[in-house]
């Protein structure tokens, strides 16, 4: 995105007025970081209070609108504008009572929304913690939060709650429509269920959108949980969507494809999804001729409250009494179904754990079937229910079916536990990628390289330094199964002793076990006793207290303390840096650690915590294990290849 100078707008309530203080700043690379603070709410309608802050931030280049923590704001429609972040900051925004308070942001006469964007909006975020709620008022609007034809969107760490809404107040909870580069993370949705008052509420809808990531979400909804569809009039397909680490329940389908399917839906991956308390786990309703391809469901758990694993069709009513995964329907009401085509292919069902009813149900609501697809993979399916009857799945009209690693409480033999009609062609049980009439789909992916530490991915900012220290034998990580490094955890003084001693004596060094210890708080039986004693003997520490002599092994290092250790590793135990000149705004040059901080910064051991008009070091901030690794690599002068 294009970066422009941003503006701070401080909105402070002073008596009956609001004072604006405007400052031009250098832009940041992240979502807008400058602030437009909204004061405590007053009166029964806070719409203008929030909207005017958003408008001002947008007009002056962008910024962050920060609500007052713990406050409840009652508003009508709120429009998020380009380059603006709405930081709930622990507050609640609830919908107003009056129907007239809500408007459409999409087009004149289109459905109204509570919080959303207009076409062409970009670089926006809604951040928590905080709550967006629909209370018991009877007003109606079609979406609680909707991003329409917008890009670069982030929604993080919020609760959307409509459990108190009446039955007539239906509406989707969180929608991305015709949008791209969207991230929804750590979102909790609590919609009305059949046992409550609300109805017609999808949890999350991804319509005609591309490059979408949904992660760490917890969704309870009356209608579909997470629905992917191509909406009419958008002219856009769904492409490149990744959904992981979510828990979903619904009074309908937990994971839904369709009903809108006028444009293609492709390259969708679900990983590590827990489905519960739903009639249907996965549902395909492709009516409108779309091509649906390269869909992978991997690592899906169906709890025993999920009645059926997979259903197709739309049930009865509205001309949709069809049960095929792709089907023709009576769109014009003339009594005849129109064949609109549709093509579903290259679908993978992999690593499923089914604890409940768990049948694949698409023939009708009492049979089991996967149908009208090409190149289907059914791999590593584990069925744990203690009762039930075969077939667990019924395959028909499938060209290219690969079944492997199937197990159940029944015989465990796919030829017996699964019904495979004669309409299925190109069937294999050997795990090979399925082919249809000799044409293969995307190959089964070969597992790519994985990082050494499970919590240090290849794109981690300190990956190279941590990996190098591990390969050279300097570090072993914080956990062995799985192997982890804990890069964001604070480096303790006990752990630091290992780093410093190996930095002094070489990779793989282990000091001898002492027969006695010098520090009063280091038991001889502790794993770190030999390391702290060696550090004392080598003259690199004087402990954390001299009378009595203590080491404080569990105490975390600060950034300042880290500079002392790693400068001495670099220059020797007797090194003392020159006096500080006072280059950091937050470090007084007479502070005991000032000379160490400046020397470490000038040597390239550790960066400043903030640059710009005022250089800051954050001397009392914790030294995490990732930063400690980078400091050690620099201190040792180890070259990264």
Image (spheres, rainbow, N blue to C red):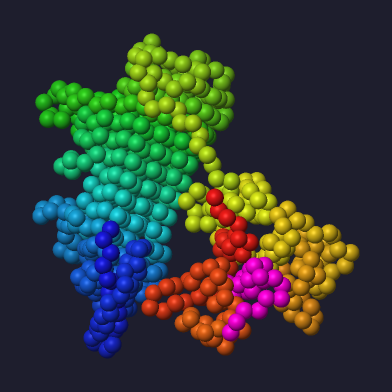
Q: For the point 79% across and 78% down, which residue is it?
A: 549
Residue 374 position, x and y percent, is 34, 22
Closer to the camera in the image, 270 or 204: 270
Q: Is residue 584 magenta?
A: no
Q: For the point 58% across and 51% down, which residue is it?
A: 467
Seen as rendered, the residue at the extreme right is 515
Asked if residue 358 lies left or right of residue 197, the reply is right
Is residue 574 depicted above or below 345 in this figure? below
Q: For the point 59% across and 46% down, which residue is it?
A: 452
Is residue 75 depicted above or below 354 in this figure? below
Q: Is residue 602 visible?
A: yes
Q: Is residue 563 magenta?
A: yes
Closer to the camera in the image, 564 or 635: 635
Q: Quadrant of residue 496?
A: bottom right
Residue range highlighted in magenta: 558-579
Closer to the camera in the image, 478 or 429: 478
Which image quadrant: the N terminus? Answer: bottom left
Residue 426 position, x and y percent, is 40, 14
Asked if residue 8 lies left or right of residue 527, the reply is left
Marker count (numbered): 0
Q: Quadrant of residue 575?
A: bottom right
Q: For the point 54% across and 42% down, which residue is it?
A: 450
Asked if residue 239 lies left or right of residue 281, the reply is left
């Amino acid at each position: 995105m294009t970066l422009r100078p941003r503006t701070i707008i401080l909105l402070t309530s002073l008596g009956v007025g609001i004072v604006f203080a405007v400052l031009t700043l250098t832009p940041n690379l992240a979502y807008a970081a400058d602030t437009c603070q909204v004061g405590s709410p007053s009166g029964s309608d806070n719409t203008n209070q929030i909207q005017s802050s958003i408008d001002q931030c947008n007009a002056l280049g962008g910024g962050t609108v920060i609500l007052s923590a713990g406050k409840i704001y009652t508003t009508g429609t709120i429009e998020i504008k380009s380059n603006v972040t709405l930081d709930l900051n622990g507050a609640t925004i609830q919908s107003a009572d009056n129907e007239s308070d809500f408007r459409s942001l999409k087009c004149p006469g289109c459905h109204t929304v509570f919080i959303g964007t207009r076409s062409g909006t970009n670089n926006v975020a809604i951040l928590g913690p905080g709550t967006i709620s629909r209370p018991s008022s009877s007003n109606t609007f079609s979406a609680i939060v909707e991003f329409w034809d917008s890009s670069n969107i982030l929604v993080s760490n919020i609760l959307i709650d409509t459990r108190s809404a009446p039955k007539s107040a239906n509406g989707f909870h969180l929608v991305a429509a015709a949008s791209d580069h969207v991230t929804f993370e750590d979102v909790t949705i609590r919609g009305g269920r059949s046992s409550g008052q609300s109805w017609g509420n999808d949890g999350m809808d991804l319509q005609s959108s591309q490059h979408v990531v949904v992660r760490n979400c917890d969704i309870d909804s009356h209608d579909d949980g997470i629905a992917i569809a191509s909406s009419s009039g958008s002219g856009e397909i769904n492409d490149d969507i990744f959904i992981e680490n979510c828990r979903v329940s619904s009074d309908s389908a937990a994971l839904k494809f369709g009903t809108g399917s006028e444009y293609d839906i492709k390259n969708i991956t679900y990983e590590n999804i827990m489905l519960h308390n739903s009639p249907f786990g996965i549902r395909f309703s492709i009516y409108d001729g779309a091509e649906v391809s390269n869909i992978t469901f991997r690592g899906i758990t169906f709890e025993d409250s999920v009645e059926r694993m997979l259903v197709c069709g739309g049930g009865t009513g509205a001309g949709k009494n069809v049960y095929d995964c792709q089907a023709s329907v009576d769109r014009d009401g003339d009594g005849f179904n129109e064949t609109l085509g549709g093509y579903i292919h290259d679908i993978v069902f992999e690593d499923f754990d089914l604890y409940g009813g768990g049948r694949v149900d698409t023939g009708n609501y009492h049979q089991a079937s996967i149908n009208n697809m090409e190149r289907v993979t059914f791999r590593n399916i584990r069925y744990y229910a203690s009762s039930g009857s075969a077939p667990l799945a019924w395959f028909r009209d499938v060209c290219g079916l690969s079944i492997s690693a199937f197990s159940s409480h029944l015989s465990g033999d796919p030829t017996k536990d699964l019904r495979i009609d004669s309409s299925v062609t190109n069937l294999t049980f050997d795990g090979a990628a399925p082919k249809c009439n000799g044409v293969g789909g995307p190959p089964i992916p070969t597992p790519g390289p994985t990082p050494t530490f499970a919590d240090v991915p290849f794109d981690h900012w300190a990956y190279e330094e941590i990996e190098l220290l591990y390969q050279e034998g300097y570090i072993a990580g914080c956990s062995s199964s799985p192997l982890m490094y804990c890069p964001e955890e604070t480096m303790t003084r006990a752990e630091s002793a290992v780093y410093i001693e190996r930095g002094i004596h070489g990779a793989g060094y282990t000091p001898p076990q002492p027969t006695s210890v010098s520090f009063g708080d280091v038991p001889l039986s502790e794993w770190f006793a030999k390391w702290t004693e060696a550090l004392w003997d080598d003259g690199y520490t004087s402990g954390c207290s001299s009378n009595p002599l203590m080491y404080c092994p569990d105490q975390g290092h600060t950034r300042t303390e880290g500079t002392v250790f790693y400068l001495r590793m670099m220059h020797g135990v007797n090194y003392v840096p020159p006096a500080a000149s006072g280059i950091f705004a937050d470090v007084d040059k007479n502070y005991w650690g000032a000379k160490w901080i400046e020397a470490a910064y000038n040597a390239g051991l550790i960066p400043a915590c903030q640059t710009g008009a005022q250089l800051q070091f954050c001397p009392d901030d914790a030294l995490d294990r990732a930063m400690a690794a980078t400091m050690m690599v620099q201190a040792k002068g180890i070259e990264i290849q």
